[in-house]
Amino acid sequence: MKTQICIIGGGPSGLMLSQLLHLKGIDTIVLERQSREYVLGRIRAGVLEHGFAELMREAQCGERMDREGEIHEGFFIAHDGKLDRIDLHEHSGGSSVMVYGQTELTRDLYEARDRMGGKVIHNVEDVKINDVTSAAPFVTYRDGDEVVRIDCDYVIGADGFHGVSRKTIPADVLREHERLYPIGWLGVLSRTKPVSPELIYARHERGFALCSLRSQVLSRYYIQVPLTDTVEDWSDEAFWAELKKRLPEEVAARLETGPSIEKSIAPLRSFVAEPMRYGNLFLAGDAAHIVPPTGARGLNSAASDIYYLYHALVDHYQKGDDAGLEGYSAKALARVWKAQRFSWWMTMMLHTFPDGISYDRKLQETELQYLFSSEKALGSLAENYVGLPF
Ligand code: FAS
Ligand code: PHB
């Protein structure tokens, strides 16, 4: 097979790029290791930056998001038994975020690819990326006993943290920067009315908690747990009881509980791989960077990578202009590191660290006191949360 762009990974990054390029007449093939059902069964991000929502609309996939998603102009931070609201609209100069689950937007992207005859191949095995430093890279994968070869101009590594793309970059070229946290987020999805119309990030001595939602009948909650915990350690009853202990009494009192329809633990990690380009291989999304979900930057960092790659590839094919491709890694990393900083800052401010020292705990308290005492501090949080410009 031959295509212009071979995309490894059928998650939101790969699908979004494939859809955007298709609309500009650029041919792609998406290779996905899992089945479509498996990909759609993963419960991940919930908050979209303004820029991500715009990309969905540009990709002609925004119609259901605009119909079923919720525009949020603020969120709450619960601390010391009270709720303080962050007015994103006021402090970001009128912007907001879209609350719409990653599962749903991935479904919308798949359906758009199907509608336009996009080539997304599932259950591929043993993907190998070859000759990326030549002018004729190619990708191979196994389909049962058959080895299939795809010749292409460029390879996009959108295969997430555990993919093969990043590992294709030689060890003497690749630089990895990582910070691990001794905590994870235990997440529960439940068919219950959300406890709050806007998100609540709760700082508590027992540990962090987050009250989020997917719709007015589907709630998403998280509590910080030690990395040594497993899902089996947490019955639904234990989860609800612990969540209530970490919320202000007025909020806990109105929490509607119910059976979990999904329950999982995600470890917190900060990670960046540099460079995001090697020859004719370009990394995008989780393949190149990971953030703790505290700042809701994970999926949104993927969006700016895709935005830069989309425009760079259109300029290449339509104008013969390679400035975007040449500048991709530096430009993407500049925004990635700002999202890393914000995610780290939110994580360090809101979580409890079992082995933490009293000095750090006092700093956390001071961060919150300063935040709510300074219009400029609130402006900094707001501009990062709604999304820095692409
Ligand atoms: P993805 O990992 O979504 O997609 C990569 C795809 O590549 C996968 O479908 C995978 O099957 C496929 N793949 C891997 N190896 C392959 C191979 N060798 N060949 C072919 N295909 C291959 N972000 C938030 O903003 N908020 C959250 O609450 C949040 N929660 C998260 C919870 C978890 C458990 C995880 C892992 C991530 C979470 N994230 C969250 C971040 C998440 O939303 C990612 O940022 C987002 O999925 C990035 O999308 P992709 O870059 O497409 O990577
Ligand atoms: C979610 O709804 O899953 C969610 C929202 C905001 C975050 C993290 C996760 O910061």
Image (cartoon, rainbow, N blue to C red):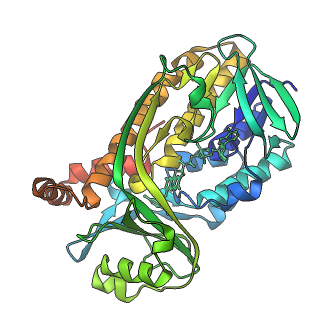
Q: Nearer the viewer, residue 145 or 202?
A: 145
Left or right of residue 167, residue 201 in this image: left
x, y percentage for residue 85? 30, 67
| Residue at the bottom extreme, as displayed | 253
**Looking at the image, residue 252 lies above or below residue 306:** below
Query: Visible in this render: residue 23?
Result: no
Q: Nearer the viewer, residue 357 or 306?
A: 357
Q: Nearer the viewer, residue 42 or 16?
A: 42
**Tag count:** 0
- Which quadrant of the figure has residue 9? top right
Q: Residue at x 31, y 76 (%)?
A: 246
- Quarter of the image with the N terminus is top right
x, y percentage for residue 120? 80, 42
x, y percentage for residue 168? 60, 25
Left or right of residue 271, residue 319 in this image: right
x, y percentage for residue 110? 75, 51
**Looking at the image, residue 239 lies above or below residue 174:** below
Q: Residue at x 59, y 64 (%)?
A: 69
Left or right of residue 390, residue 158 in this image: right
Left or right of residue 344, residue 377 in this image: left
Query: Visible in this render: residue 221?
Result: yes
Q: Residue at x 73, y 19 (%)?
A: 318
